Amino acid sequence: MEYFLTVVEHSSFTRAAELLHVTQPALSHQIKALEKSVGGDLLERMTRGVRLTPMGRAFLPHAELAVRSAAQAQRAARAAAGAEGGELHIATVHAIAVGILPDVFARWHRAHPGVELVLHEYATTEALEEALERGTADLAVGPPPERWSGPVLRVGDEEIVLVVPFDDRLAGRSTVRLEELSDHTWIRCAMEPLVHGRRFLDWACGQAGFSPRTAVRTEHTSTAVRMAAAGVGVATAPAHIVTGAVGEDCVVLHVDPPWRRALTVFSRVPMTGAAEVFTDLLRSSLPYGTPESATPAPRAYADC
């Protein structure tokens, strides 16, 4: 299956054989053996490259999952012996990758230089959960997943703040009530979760008696922060990405009462070895760390 995926990725038996360090006849023999076991052709050989047959298209996602699962099984077996070697694959959303993980990764590298960390970043929590379910990473760091059958551990909380430019009329304040921003325009991010079936900002502003006027919609939180700093509108963002990464030329306003959401680590299987050690390190690094014995994490933003 790994040979098959390499041929598909590069559309070439020649290039795949080079990357796999095997001869082209040996590679062709393995693909033919795979096709025989499946019961039909998976690849159509053309003058210039190859392409998937209908059977090959149906086979492809299952082969990808099988190969990833095999690699994850090897990493899990090595990790169970301790955090002394190998790789640890971590999936997260962009805001956490930029705002929290750099310092955590630096601490990890000093304590466990023999374990390489591989980071997979996603724009939305939906994409994050889907990727972990496919076996892309060993664990994920993010808000509590909506529906998850594997382990979910609360490691802390993140505060959600408002971002405005220096010349905003509220820039001299440290805290603000949401209704004071009813005349502002807003920058909406794809990371905005649902609360009671509505986008969080629509729900929260509705509770404050107004409907937010949207100026821009973005994919990434860091982009929203930069837009807010330029004066496009007000952005909501985790405090860690503003104060620690991309917010040097803007003003942070804390909402009264504060907005916080749970931060979790979740995986497909129980976390042992390097994964368990990384989770403990992350918990000790967060500003609002939560003991493992704490109550289960609430749904994102539901307790604002």
Image (tube, grey):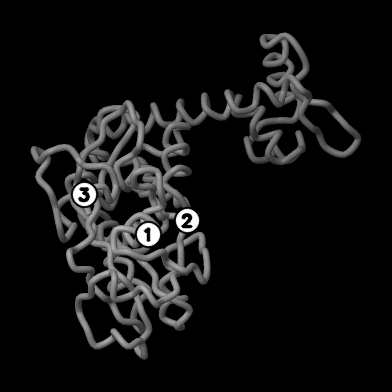
How far across and how far down the image is residue 220, in percent? 47, 61
Residue 80, by quadrant, is top left
Name the residue beneath numbered marker 3. 303
For the point 36% across and 49% down, the residue is 117
Which quadrant of the figure contains the N terminus? top right
Q: Tell me which numbered mark, 3 or 2, is placed earlier along the sequence.
A: 2
Query: What's the CA distance linking mark 3 and mark 2?
Result: 21 Å
Q: Residues within 10 Å of mark 1 (few under 14, many from 20)?
A: some
Query: What's the CA distance linking mark 3 and mark 1?
Result: 14 Å
Closer to the eye: label 3 or 2: 3
How far across and how far down the image is residue 283, in percent? 17, 50
Looking at the image, do the residues carrying marks 3 and 1 touch, with CB atoms under 8 Å apart?
Answer: no
Decide: is 7 above or below 154: above
For the point 12% across and 38% down, the residue is 295
Q: Amino acid at mark 1?
A: Leu
Query: What's the CA distance linking mark 2 and mark 1?
Result: 12 Å
Q: Tell me which numbered mark, 3 or 1, is placed earlier along the sequence.
A: 1
Left or right: 208 with respect to 30?
left
Q: Amino acid at mark 2?
A: Ala
How far across and how far down the image is residue 274, in percent? 25, 40
Decide: is 198 above or below 136: below
Residue 105, by quadrant, is bottom left
Name the residue beneath numbered marker 1. 201
Question: As drawn, which residue projects farthest toward the right?
Answer: 47
Residue 87, by quadrant, is top left
Which quadrant of the figure contains the C terminus? bottom left
Decide: is 74 above or below 130: above
Q: Secondary structure at mark 1?
A: helix
Name the residue beneath numbered marker 2. 190
